[in-house]
Image (cartoon, rainbow, N blue to C red):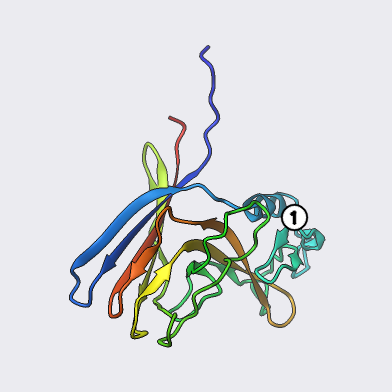
């Protein structure tokens, strides 16, 4: 029997910068190496959760295996879908929402396992240093030799000047049983080798391609 080499899900980041007429200015592709500690915290929280029948929320939510973007330790709340908080889980953020989906920032600080947020999130808007966040969408899971899906978000620069992107991250929102009924966690953060310059009037499209295979 041959030697078995363990395989882990991998991620690749693609990006494209296009001018206001859709002309390609720059594109790139690089391995996303930096799943942060929350990805293991999420797996731990899922497998340790036990949903008590007749209860809206899982008993496992008391295990604080996740850290939200404010640095607060959180448990995983799994609801029945009949309450305000238990059903909020996901990364398909609508336009203008920076609490979930693909997010970008201006910090090039090295990535560490304990990081829980971008170093300097670029806000949504049209003021200097801001980008307009379009909706994040997730493509249908493809099952072949490798199973994969893509997470995609486009950003528009209407700030009047170039905006420099130095970090890219992936945020997911989870439900809570009390107000504000959700919190956000960062699962991945990467610092591109070279900063991505987004000229005024241009768009930046970022894709996370997440795949897994045994070969």
Give the camera-side residue of 6 and 83.
Answer: 6
How far from the left and from the top, in percent, is residue 17?
29, 66
The residue depicted at 20 percent of the width and 71 percent of the height is 22
Q: Is residue 20 above or below residue 59?
A: below
Give the camera-side residue of 167 and 79.
Answer: 167
Judge left or right: residue 159 versus residue 59: left
Q: Quadrant of the C terminus?
A: top left
The residue depicted at 53 percent of the width and 25 percent of the height is 5
- Most distant residue in the bottom direction: 127
Give the camera-side residue of 212 and 115.
Answer: 115
The residue depicted at 41 percent of the width and 70 percent of the height is 164
Give the camera-side residue of 44 and 58.
Answer: 44
Q: Is residue 1 above or below residue 185?
A: above
Q: Quadrant of residue 195?
A: bottom left
Q: Secondary structure at mark 1?
A: loop
- Most distant residue in the top direction: 1
Q: Quadrant of residue 57?
A: bottom right
Circle 1 is placed at which residue position?
49
How far from the left and from the top, in percent, is residue 135?
41, 74
């Amino acid at each position: 029997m041959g030697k078995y080499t363990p395989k882990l899900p991998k991620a690749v980041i693609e990006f494209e910068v296009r001018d206001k007429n859709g002309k390609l200015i720059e594109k790139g592709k690089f391995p996303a190496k930096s799943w942060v500690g929350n990805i293991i915290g999420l797996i731990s929280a899922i497998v340790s959760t036990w949903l008590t029948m007749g209860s809206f929320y899982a008993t496992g939510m008391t295990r604080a295996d996740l850290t939200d973007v404010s640095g607060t330790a959180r448990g995983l709340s799994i609801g029945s879908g009949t309450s305000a908080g238990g059903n909020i889980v996901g990364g398909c953020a609508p336009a203008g929402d920076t609490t979930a989906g693909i997010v970008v920032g201006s910090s090039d600080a090295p990535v560490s396992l304990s990081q829980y947020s971008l170093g300097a999130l670029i806000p949504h808007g049209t003021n200097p240093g801001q980008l307009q966040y379009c909706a994040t969408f997730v493509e249908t899971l493809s099952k072949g030799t490798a199973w994969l899906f893509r997470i995609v978000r486009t950003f528009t620069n209407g700030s009047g000047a170039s905006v420099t992107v130095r970090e890219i991250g992936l945020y997911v929102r989870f439900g809570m049983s009390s107000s504000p009924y959700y919190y956000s966690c960062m699962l991945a953060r990467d610092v591109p080798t070279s900063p991505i310059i987004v000229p005024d009037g241009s768009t930046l499209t970022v894709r996370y391609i997440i795949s897994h295979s045994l070969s």
